[in-house]
């Protein structure tokens, strides 16, 4: 099944990457397009890495919003940049369901006039060097596209060159 938006099956724009800190350095690896189809697919691909180091996924969904996915023994930690996206996108609805947050009761025609808000764990990358207040500022800048926000995260954590190389290779 392909990714879904607003109940239709279409291919989503965007990208999914795994970011791994291993052997004292960052590595970035492209994930398959199915990672954007649903949260379980993204988790499955990330867990398939079997990395002993810290790892997480960055999902740019349809160039509209992003999800950070960080599997952990106690359960997957998640951050969704725009909760209103759950009205139109299955993966955003998956994230809210996992977070036990209701999908916003918004008419699809009202979404463009609604200020987006994040849901999830703003401390998701704090132990790696990105404190909650800094991530909150990045997520809160709704004038930026997800790839621009990821670039800011990558710069702060030190994997911007690795991220750029993977994204350039996908073009």
Image (tube, rainbow, N blue to C red):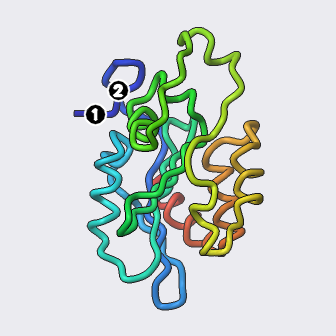
| Residue at 76% across, 37% down | 143
> Circle 2 sits in a helix, a strand or a loop, which is it?
loop
Q: Give the crowd class for mark 1: few <14, some 14-19, many >=20 residues within 10 Å.
A: some
Give the position of the N terminus as an image quadrant: top left
Whether 46 is drawn above or below 15: the answer is below
Tell me which residue sits at (71%, 69%) in the image: 156
**In the image, residue 13 lies at what x, y percent?**
46, 37
Q: Is 20 left, or right, of 164 in this rendering?
A: left
As drawn, 51 above or below 36? below
From the viewer's perspective, is residue 76 above or below residue 54?
above
At which x and y percent is residue 19?
Answer: 48, 68
Q: Quadrant of residue 140?
A: top right
- The quadrant holding residue 65 is top right
Foreground residue among 160 and 113: 113
Residue nearest the viewer, comparing 141 with 104: 104
**Left of 151 or right of it: where is 104?**
left
Q: Earlier in the sequence, mark 1 or mark 2?
A: 1
- Tell me: residue 84, above or below residue 24: above
Badge 1 vs badge 2, beta-carbon distance below 8 Å: yes
Q: Is residue 104 left or right of residue 116?
A: left
Q: Give the numbered dot on residue 73.
A: none
Where residue 21 appears, as percent x and y from the top left, is 50, 79
Q: CA distance from mark 1 to mark 2?
A: 6 Å
Q: Residue tagged by mark 2?
A: 10
Location of residue 2 in the rendering, given as x and y in whole percent from the top left corner: 28, 33
The local secondary structure at tag 1 comes to: loop
> Which residue is under mark 1?
2
Determine which quarter of the picture holds residue 119: top right
Residue drawn 66% across the image and 61% down it: 153
């Amino acid at each position: 099944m392909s990714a879904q938006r607003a109940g239709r099956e279409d291919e989503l724009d965007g990208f999914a990457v795994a970011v791994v800190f291993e052997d004292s350095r960052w590595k970035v690896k492209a994930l398959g397009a199915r990672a954007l189809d649903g949260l379980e697919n993204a988790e499955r691909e990330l867990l398939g890495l079997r990395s002993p180091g810290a790892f997480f996924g960055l999902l740019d969904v349809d160039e509209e919003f992003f999800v950070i996915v960080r599997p952990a023994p106690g359960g997957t930690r998640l951050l969704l940049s725009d909760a209103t996206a759950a009205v139109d996108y299955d993966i955003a609805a998956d994230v809210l369901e996992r977070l036990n947050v209701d999908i916003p009761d918004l008419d699809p025609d009202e979404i463009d006039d609604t200020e987006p808000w994040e849901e999830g764990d703003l401390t998701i990358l704090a132990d790696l060097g990105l404190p909650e207040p800094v991530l909150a500022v990045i997520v809160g800048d709704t004038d930026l596209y997800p790839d621009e926000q990821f670039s800011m995260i990558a710069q702060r954590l030190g994997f911007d060159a690795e991220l750029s190389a993977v994204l350039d290779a996908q073009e």
